[in-house]
């Protein structure tokens, strides 16, 4: 059951008042009982003491008549139940009062609560000079005392009950008064909770009476209603403005989206054109490199072609000799038997003059040399063909040392007449690369190294693994690079070479290729001491380029 605040107030005050009144009743009754007990004990002690003093002479003189007279006189008191005088030998000298009580065994009571027969038993000693001659036993009825205590208890309980009723009535009146304003606040809160949804705050303010704290709460509530109404109006205005703004914004977004799509299309076209231009520049740089290598490649091809041509001339003579030998053998088979012996001897002499043993040995060597020379020409042509081919974006796991060797086979003839090539190719893991592009980078660096050496010099190629990176270092002891040019070295069309030598794109393109692979191209140079270019490629693929083939 749910109790209202008013009922809780009434019950709370009533409970506290009842607890206090019950405590008061019990305390008052207990106090009265203690008071009555003390008075009873003192009275009994006083009576027995005085009576013992009065009867002492009679006990000592054994004057029983006097003792009887004293007893009958004392028993006239209405609350004295009995009186008994005994000597030191427990003999009854005199007694008077209730026969029933006199027949009971005497047992002194120390306090009122211990009385079980309605009579408070007490005694007083009859003594002289420290010697006890007897005692006085007395019984006082406690009925009147208990009636007085009961009467007091009834009065206090009645007063407590009346006070509880008055407190309950006061609590009801006070609770009704206090909760009246709270009921208004409660009703106002319920009303405003339903008004918030539709925004209608009319008839939601509550009536204000008085000037107490609840009045302040009511005023604050009405102020809250006013603020909510103002805020609702502001919210409605903002929502309307926002709705209009959203409509305008949607229109702008549509227009901007259309414009953005158009710009994206233009950007895609520009990227395609830029990529095509970049590929053309890379291909042009390749063609420029091939042009630089052309003289050396031509010489490299001319050497095997020359000795193959010479070998073919010798083989032509040897073939003519074998043709003559076959003609002689055919003629020998057609002559008469009597002349065959003479012709055979002539043929043997002719064969000895031709030195067929030497011809056979030399023919084998000529054919082997010719095959090797033509294989060299084939490899050079295939290397140039592969190098000059337009690049794709495909990558594969490849040994960088193989790239170095393949590149050297193309450029070594360009460098071998004025440069000594030293290789320190260490065992390194394979890297994910576009082989043609990396070959182009190595070709550009080797050609630049050769051009930096004017007369004679050394180019040292080293590969090694460091911090999960494969590093290819190309070191030359050429002219070096001026310090102010180092920061511009990888800029497009920047060159330190003479006019007409190079395009100024080699290092820029090489730098871009290394970035595509997630690597770096670094340079260290001292003027008149030489330069060292380092290709740094990650063992783990760090590139963001699309289209790799793993």
Image (cartoon, helix red, strand yellow):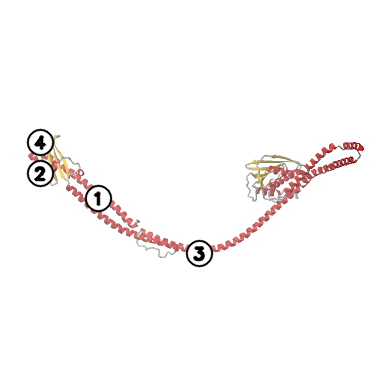
Q: Residues within 10 Å of mark 2 (few under 14, many from 20)?
A: few
| Element class at badge 4 | helix
Tags 1 and 2 in contact by the CB under 8 Å rule? no
Q: Nearer the viewer, mark 1 or mark 4?
A: 1
Q: Is residue 344 visible?
A: yes
Residues at marks 2 and 4, CA–CA distance in whole angstroms: 20 Å
Tags 3 and 2 in contact by the CB under 8 Å rule? no
Q: Residue 240: give its label.
A: 3
Q: Which residue is mark 4?
A: 60
Residues at marks 3 and 2, CA–CA distance in whole angstroms: 113 Å
Residues at marks 1 and 2, CA–CA distance in whole angstroms: 40 Å
Corner quadrant of residue 260:
bottom right
Q: Position of residue 21 (x, y in %)?
A: 26, 51
Going from N to C along the chain, the mark reached first, 2 or 4, is 4
Going from N to C along the chain, the mark reached first, 3 or 4, is 4
Going from N to C along the chain, the mark reached first, 1 or 4, is 1
Q: Residues within 10 Å of mark 3 (few under 14, many from 20)?
A: few
Tags 3 and 4 in contact by the CB under 8 Å rule? no
| Element class at badge 3 | helix
Q: Which residue is mark 1?
A: 25
Going from N to C along the chain, the mark reached first, 1 or 2, is 1
């Amino acid at each position: 059951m749910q109790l209202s605040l008013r009922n809780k107030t009434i019950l709370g005050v009533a409970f506290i008042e009842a607890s206090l009144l019950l405590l008061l009743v019990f305390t008052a009754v207990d106090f009265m009982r203690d008071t009555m007990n003390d008075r009873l004990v003192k009275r009994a002690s006083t009576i027995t003491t005085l009576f013992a003093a009065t009867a002492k002479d009679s006990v000592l003189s054994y004057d029983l008549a006097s003792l009887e007279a004293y007893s009958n006189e004392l028993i006239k008191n209405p609350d004295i139940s009995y009186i008994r005088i005994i000597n030191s030998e427990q003999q009854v000298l005199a007694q008077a009062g209730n026969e029933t009580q006199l027949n009971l065994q005497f047992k002194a009571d120390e306090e009122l609560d211990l009385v079980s027969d309605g009579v408070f038993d007490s005694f007083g000693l009859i003594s002289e000079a420290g010697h006890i001659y007897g005692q006085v036993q007395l019984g006082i009825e406690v009925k009147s005392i208990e009636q007085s205590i009961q009467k007091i208890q009834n009065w206090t309980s009645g007063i407590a009950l009346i006070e509880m009723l008055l407190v309950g009535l006061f609590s009801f009146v006070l609770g009704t008064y206090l909760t009246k304003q709270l009921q208004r606040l409660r009703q106002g809160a319920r009303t405003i909770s339903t008004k918030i949804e539709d925004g209608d705050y009319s008839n939601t303010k509550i009536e204000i009476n008085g000037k107490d704290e609840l009045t302040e709460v009511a005023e604050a509530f009405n102020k809250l209603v006013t603020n909510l109404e103002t805020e609702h109006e502001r919210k409605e205005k903002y929502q309307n403005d926002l709705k209009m703004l959203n409509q305008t914004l949607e229109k702008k977004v549509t227009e901007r989206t259309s414009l953005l799509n158009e710009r994206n299309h233009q950007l895609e076209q520009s990227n395609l054109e830029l990529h095509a231009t970049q590929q053309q520049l890379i291909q042009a740089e390749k063609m420029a490199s091939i042009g630089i290598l052309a003289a050396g490649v031509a010489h490299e091809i001319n050497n095997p072609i020359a000795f193959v041509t010479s070998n073919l001339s010798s083989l032509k003579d040897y073939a003519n000799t074998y043709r003559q030998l076959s003609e002689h053998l055919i003629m020998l088979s057609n002559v008469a038997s009597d002349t065959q012996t003479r012709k055979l001897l002539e043929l043997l002499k002719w064969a000895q003059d031709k030195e067929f043993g030497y011809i056979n040995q030399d023919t084998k060597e000529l054919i082997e040399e010719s095959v090797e020379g033509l294989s060299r020409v084939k490899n050079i042509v295939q290397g140039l063909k592969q190098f000059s081919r337009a690049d794709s974006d495909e990558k594969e796991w490849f040994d960088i040392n193989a790239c170095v060797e393949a590149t050297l086979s193309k450029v070594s003839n360009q460098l071998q007449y004025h440069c000594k090539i030293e290789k320190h190719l260490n065992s390194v893991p394979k890297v994910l690369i576009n082989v043609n592009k990396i070959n182009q980078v190595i070709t550009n660096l080797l050609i630049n190294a050769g051009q930096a050496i004017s007369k004679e010099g050394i180019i040292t190629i080293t590969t090694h693994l460091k911090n999960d990176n494969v590093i290819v270092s190309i070191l030359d002891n050429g002219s070096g690079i001026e310090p102010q040019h180092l920061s511009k070295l990888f800029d497009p069309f920047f060159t330190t070479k003479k006019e007409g030598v190079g395009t100024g794109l080699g290092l820029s393109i090489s730098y871009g290729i290394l970035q595509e692979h997630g690597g770096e191209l670094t340079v260290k140079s001292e003027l008149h001491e030489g330069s060292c270019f380092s290709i740094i490629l990650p063992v783990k693929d760090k590139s963001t380029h699309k289209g790799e083939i793993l």
